[in-house]
Amino acid sequence: MNRPKTYHITTFGCQMNEHDSETIAGMLSQMGFSESPGRDEADVAIINTCSVRENADKRFFGTLGQLKKKKLADPEFTVCVCGCMMQQQHVIDSIKSKYPWVDIIFGTHNIHQFPQLLESVLREKEKVVNVWEDGGDIVEGLPAKRLYKHKAFVNIMYGCNNFCTYCIVPYTRGRERSRRPQDILDEVKRLVSDGVREVTLLGQNVNSYKGDEHTDFADLIYRLNEVSGLERIRFMTSHPKDLSDKLIQAYGDCDKLCNYIHLPVQSGSSRVLARMNRKYTREDYLNLIAKLKKTVPQITISTDIIVGFPGETEEDFEETLDLVRKVEYDSAFTFLYSIRRGTPAEKYEDQIPEDVKHQRFNRLVETVNSISAEKNAGYVGRVEKVLVEGLSKTSDRTYTGRTEEFKLINFAGTPDMVGKIIDVKVTEGKTFSLEGEVI
Ligand code: SAH
Ligand code: SF4
Ligand code: F3S
């Protein structure tokens, strides 16, 4: 029988998408498929899309274009597309009209149906589009083929209720839904018995997690801190408006909670923050940072910043630069504002010209990088606990890992170190990473 045997998944976007791809891979493994190293050799190709910025859209359509030749040469080749872009009707319409050879379109809310959809397409040789508009109940117990052996993503909630005026995510991921604390604890215990030492709890805004009347996000951390065998707990992303004193205290109390936080600020100007509907001011944010640094002096902090949001003036932008200098971020993801169809900011008339956006972006990146380099230089001579992830891409003797504070560190190592937490002395601080030697 010439039943398809191998699959390949291309993933765009955030950790949510990466984790969804792990679930899709897990379901395909259960169906008897194996992973193909390249997309061109695979029998089934899946593209998991992101729509957070325009360049993510463009990359998706570019990838589809590349698949066209193979599909035309081999009609048995099955092409499936899913993820955030598929939650937008205009995207589905354009796939149907310009890429009619795509076999399966499904969305973010019905990933669990993928095996059925694939079976039916392979059997009937007909195309299917099946996208749910809303989340429905959380489906537990789906398999996952994890990308890493020693660390794992664990979704604790889905969706977002915040409707920041620039953002598409509330439209593609639906409303907030939290998993039951017991389901999360059971999953983490299972992962630990499988060799996982570090979990990253995922949600668009984990701070508004509400498991039941006794379990908010901080409570969940306290409960996970008790799981024996688990060594590190991380989470992302947390919204400043919901970052509670109780969670800050958890950093002080829970030894497994890593001294690192990703706390997206988006802008340093209260005026811009209000137009973004972020629901905090520059001062609120700086107060939170002060509290965090007081409770956990060694904490490292990263952020997301959008440059060129409609109406952003030079003064607003300088407030962002000033905030970056005050907080002294260890790293920052910086983005050019990108108009997203259907969001309120799409309609704002005071869009910023591209050249101004780019010029501000470059100034911001320069500031961010010089602070990162300075902070990393301060680590030289320190001994860090490093969870070894594996070989670095550059050499077959250099291994990489993460310090508790989420710094990427490279060092000469051996294969037996992978998955262990070892002591590494920092010998050099670069802009985006550290160099070290095992002691
Ligand atoms: N839930 C997370 C962020 C998810 S999107 C949070 O609230 O922090 C990741 C980042 O993409 C955002 O923090 C924001 O900085 C950026 N982003 C989202 N929409 C954008 C847009 N339209 N243009 C540019 N950057 C955007
Ligand atoms: Fe988007 Fe704001 Fe929700 Fe984050 S909190 S996903 S930026 S709407
Ligand atoms: Fe992109 Fe969807 Fe994540 S839009 S950033 S993949 S939630």
Image: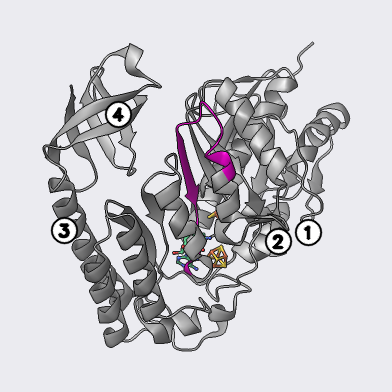
Give yes or no for contact between labels 4 and 3 (Cβ–Cβ under 8 Å). Answer: no
- Which quadrant of the rendered structure holds the N terminus? top right
Q: Earlier in the sequence, mark 4 or mark 1?
A: 1
Secondary structure under the numbered disc 2 in the rendered image? loop
Q: Spot the residue most to the front.
A: 253
Structural crowding at the residue carrying mark 2, measured as other residues with C-alpha within 10 Å and reported as few (<14), some (14–19) or many (≥20): some
User: Distance from label 2 to label 1 (Cα)?
Assistant: 6 Å
User: What residue do we see at 49% from left, 84% from top?
Assistant: 275
Res 134 label: 1
Q: Tell me what residue is drawn at x 68 percent, y 54 percent.
A: 86
Which x, y percent locates residue 159?
66, 58
Q: Report whether 217 appears left or right of 260.
A: right
The type of residue carrying mark 4 is Thr
The residue that disc 2 covers is 174
Few, some or many C-alpha atoms within 10 Å of disc 4 (few <14, some 14-19, many ≥20)? many
For disc 3, the neighbor class at 10 Å (few under 14, some 14 to 19, many from 20) is few
Asked whether the viewer can see residue 5, the reply is yes
Badges 2 and 1: C-beta atoms under 8 Å apart? Answer: yes
Q: Viewer-proximal residue, 70 or 332?
A: 332
Three-letter residue code for mark 2:
Gly
Left or right: residue 98 compared with residue 241: right
Residue highlighted by disc 3: 370
In 3D space, how far apart are the residues under numbered discs 4 and 1 (Cα atoms)? 40 Å
Q: CA distance from mark 2 to mark 4?
A: 36 Å
Q: For mark 4, what is the residue? A: 400
